[in-house]
Amino acid sequence: MPMVNPKSKVSGRPKICYRPILPSDLDTIEHLHGKLFPIRYESLFFQDVVNGHDIVSWGAVDRSRPDGQSDELIGFVTARIVLAKESEIVDILGYDSSKSDQTLIYILTLGVVDAYRNLGIASSLIREVIKYASSIPTCRAVYLHVISYNNAAIFLYKKMSFKCIRRLQGFYLINGQHYDSYLFVYYVNGGRSACSPLEFLTGIVSCMRSGLKSIAARLCRNEERKISRWAKCKENHSLVSSTHNKKNMAIEFTRYECV
Ligand SMILES: CC(C)(COP(=O)(O)OP(=O)(O)OC[C@H]1O[C@@H](n2cnc3c(N)ncnc32)[C@H](O)[C@@H]1OP(=O)(O)O)[C@@H](O)C(=O)NCCC(=O)NCCS
């Protein structure tokens, strides 16, 4: 299966298009999840994604790539519709969510191939999800979890006006180690937070802390890139790539949350 070389930056002007994910994307979507996330997903999950069983999804392709690759996924988002009253955020929604047929969209996974990052592809994919959520009259919000060290994703959700409402201690268990997660929410169709002022403040303080870290990471990013490029030239043999690190992680959880 031809895949984008993750190390090379995309050359020329990509022509990014968005389309539904199809059964023919099965191998690619599985391959991309394996590359981009430190957790392993069951094959049933991929079957559900490509067949649209309880899962909605969008893919991004670069039509400017040579024939045979112009329809190959270079980015994706997968999500599920859940009942608000059965969700973990029922307490922060309006008072009638616990008894009505109100729904939410939960983002399961989101990823963009390395070579196509920072081109706004993930932002566009999230906008598709928000548009879809807004088109469902019963839908009140789009929400997701993100692991607390994923600065790129945290920055992205904040940029897109998602609200960080909670920090969940030890939410993820990866390779025997616990990691916190943030819970981000984007309200649609008049959905709104019903949390107490104290909870709201606690959430804000927690998210501001991560925001400061994210800004610092952004400022350092260019410098880091220079250093890592230099390091690659000088000490290629001793570098362990992040992909390699990810592969070595033993995965110990079965849910489908975003990381
Ligand atoms: C997170 C991810 C989906 C973003 O995809 P993308 O297409 O590059 O996102 P976009 O181009 O729409 O936006 C990226 C924004 O984050 C910023 N950003 C990127 N890396 C960053 C970092 N380390 N720290 C802070 N901000 C960062 C970019 O500057 C950009 O903001 P800008 O448009 O204001 O410049 C992508 O990095 C990815 O696939 N990561 C691996 C999988 C993953 O972590 N998925 C999310 C799980 S919750």
Image (spheres, rainbow, N blue to C red):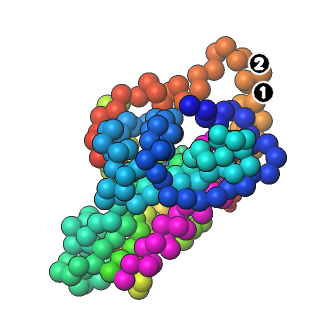
Q: Is residue 81 visible?
A: yes
Is residue 35 or residue 212 the one in the foreground?
Answer: 35
Q: Left of 229 or right of it: where is 117?
A: left
The residues colored magenta run 113-137
Is residue 147 or residue 191 the one in the foreground?
Answer: 191
Q: Quadrant of residue 88?
A: bottom left
**What element does badge 2 sit on?**
helix
Residue 45 percent across, percent down from the top left:
33, 45
Residue 234 image label: 2
Residue 158 image label: none
Determine crowd level at label 1: few under 14, some 14-19, many 20+ residues with C-alpha closer than 10 A: few
User: Marks 2 and 1: in contact by CB < 8 Å?
Assistant: yes
Question: From the viewer's perspective, is residue 9 above or below residue 134?
Answer: above
Residue type at the position of mark 1 = Trp
**What element does badge 1 sit on?**
helix
Residue 213 percent across, percent down from the top left:
57, 52
Residue 1 percent across, percent down from the top left:
56, 31
Question: From the viewer's perspective, is residue 146 above or below residue 158?
Answer: above
Q: Residue pushed farthest top?
A: 237
- For disc 1, the marked residue is 230
